[in-house]
């Protein structure tokens, strides 16, 4: 039992260590403001890991959602969230704002 | 106005489904007197959890660069999935016990622990969906776009709509015979737990705790678009993902393999053994 918890703790720490070292990720920024995403098209390299920061500059909450990217994240007004993405194959991945589905639409193009 | 109502009702639906299954089960088994306190304290706990989670979204979204909340969510999803699975096993077991003893002894620890499980499943189910709802409603009521009154009205109507669904579901399910009720709800609860495991896998992959193995193993977004009504229903009930990773598929498959070997196959064996006994019993009586 003790041995197992020791192994679990070590692998957990190891995980943090590798993550702290691997912080050189490309960063994309997406701004949402009361149901509008800017820009509506984002580009990123395929097959690499990158970070997408979603900033909410509006006065209402938004939920960044993408079934294609398997991500779903609520952003409170005035806040920003970081979404870790990739490595993903080249292609076009749609996303939308769940709280403003009619107007908040965008896509991420990986090349 | 109408869109607020629908978003609130939809966010509430999954939680409502789970709570109404628990309520209908307890009513069928005549457990609702003992279990009521547990169920409603679970619901109350869920409402508080929603508020706490919504506050965390406002104030802790930068915590560990956003990783803190991801770990938290992954933990929440895993716990919910485990507890929900355990609850189905408990429901079947307690159902058998009740059949055995007419005068039921529900003071024992097995029944008690099950009631705590029920409270926890209700609390986690409501907290999970409710936190999004709380963030949404709270921010809308603060914004200039809508008047606070309109937001409050629409949210109350949305919650009322969800309660209406709850009432008709509980009533409708109470009418089903126990076998059918159990077959349908246990599948639903297992499916929901499986969908939660997929969500947890997605968070853990994002955190690099689990590898995705193959990022996109297949793509059905052309056939069943996730935003279509059919795709949304599949997403709600089955955790449908149009572009899953290999890891998600493996986790989901493994979960169902476990459920089959621990729950369904022993259940079928027991059922056929009982049938056999019932079929041979009269013969042996005749011989004697």
Image (tube, helix red, strand yellow):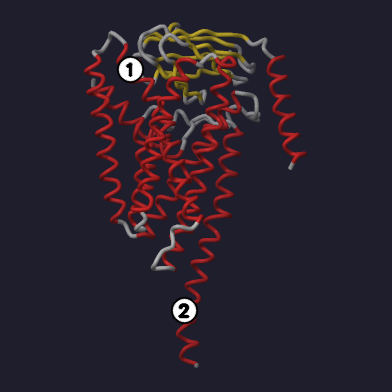
Please, which chain is the residue tagged with disc 2 on?
Answer: B
* Label 2, label 1: how far apart the Cα atoms are: 62 Å
Secondary structure type for disc 1: loop
Image quadrant assignment for residue A19 = top right
In the rendered image, the residue lying farthest to the front is B107
Residue B93 x %, y %: 48, 59
Residue A26 x %, y %: 62, 9
- Labelled disc at residue A102: 1
Task: Please indicate whether residue B71 sits to the left or right of residue B240 in the image.
Answer: right
| Residue to which mark 2 is pinned | B279
| Quarter in which the N terminus of chain B is drawn | top left
Dot 1 crowding, Cα within 10 Å, few <14, some 14–19, many 20+? few
Of tags 2 and 1, the one toward the viewer is 2
Residues B56 and A96: in front is B56
- Residue drawn at the location 58% of the way across and 18% of the way down: A84
- Residue drawn at the location 34% of the way across and 45% of the way down: B20
Residue A78 x %, y %: 43, 8
Residue A79 x %, y %: 46, 11
In the rendered image, the residue lying farthest to the right is A3
Task: Please indicate whether residue B221 sits to the left or right of residue B166 in the image.
Answer: right
Dot 2 crowding, Cα within 10 Å, few <14, some 14–19, many 20+? few
Please, which chain is the residue tagged with disc 1 on?
Answer: A
Look at the picture and state if B72 lies above or below B181: above
- Labelled disc at residue A9: none
Number of numbered discs visible in the structure rendering: 2
Residues B238 and A6: in front is A6
Q: Specify whether disc 2 shares its chain with disc 1.
A: no
Secondary structure type for disc 2: helix
- Residue drawn at the location 48% of the way across and 9% of the way down: A30
Image quadrant assignment for residue B119 = top left
Task: Please indicate whether residue B23 sits to the left or right of residue B250 in the image.
Answer: left
Residues A55 and A100: in front is A55
């Amino acid at each position: 039992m003790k041995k197992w918890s020791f192994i679990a703790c070590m692998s957990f720490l190891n995980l943090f260590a590798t993550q702290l070292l691997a912080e050189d990720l490309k960063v994309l920024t997406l701004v949402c403001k009361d149901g509008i995403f800017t820009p509506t098209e984002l580009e990123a390299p395929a097959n690499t890991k990158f970070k997408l920061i979603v900033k909410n500059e509006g006065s209402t909450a938004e939920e960044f959602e993408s079934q294609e990217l398997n991500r779903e994240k609520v952003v409170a007004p005035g806040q920003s969230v970081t979404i870790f993405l990739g490595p993903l194959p080249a292609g076009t991945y749609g996303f939308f704002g769940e709280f403003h589905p009619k107007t908040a639409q965008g896509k991420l193009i990986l090349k | 106005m109408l869109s607020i109502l629908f978003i609130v009702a939809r966010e509430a639906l999954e939680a409502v489904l789970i709570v109404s299954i628990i309520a209908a089960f307890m009513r069928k088994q005549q457990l609702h007197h003992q279990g009521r306190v547990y169920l409603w304290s679970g619901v109350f706990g869920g409402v508080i959890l929603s508020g706490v989670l919504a506050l965390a979204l406002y104030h802790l979204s930068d915590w560990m660069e956003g990783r803190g909340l991801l770990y938290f969510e992954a933990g929440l999803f895993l716990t919910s999935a485990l507890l929900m699975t355990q609850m189905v096993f408990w429901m079947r077991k307690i159902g058998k016990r009740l059949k055995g003893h007419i005068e039921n002894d529900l003071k024992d620890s097995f029944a008690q622990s099950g009631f705590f499980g029920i409270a926890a499943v209700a609390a986690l189910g409501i907290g999970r969906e409710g936190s999004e709802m709380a963030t949404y409603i709270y921010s809308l009521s603060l914004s200039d776009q809508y008047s606070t009154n309109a937001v409050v009205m629409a949210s109350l109507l949305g919650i009322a709509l969800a309660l209406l669904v709850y009432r008709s579901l509980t009533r409708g399910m109470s009418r089903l015979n126990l076998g059918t009720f159990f077959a349908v709800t246990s599948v639903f609860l297992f499916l929901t737990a499986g969908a939660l495991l997929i969500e947890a896998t997605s968070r853990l992959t994002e955190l690099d705790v689990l590898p995705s193995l193959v990022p996109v193993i297949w793509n059905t977004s052309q056939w069943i678009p996730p935003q279509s009504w059919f795709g949304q229903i599949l997403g709600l009930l089955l955790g449908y993902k149009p572009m899953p990773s290999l890891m998600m598929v493996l986790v989901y498959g493994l979960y169902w393999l476990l459920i089959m070997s621990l729950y369904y196959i022993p259940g079928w064996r027991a059922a056929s053994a009982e049938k056999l006994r019932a079929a041979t019993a009269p013969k042996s009586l005749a011989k004697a």
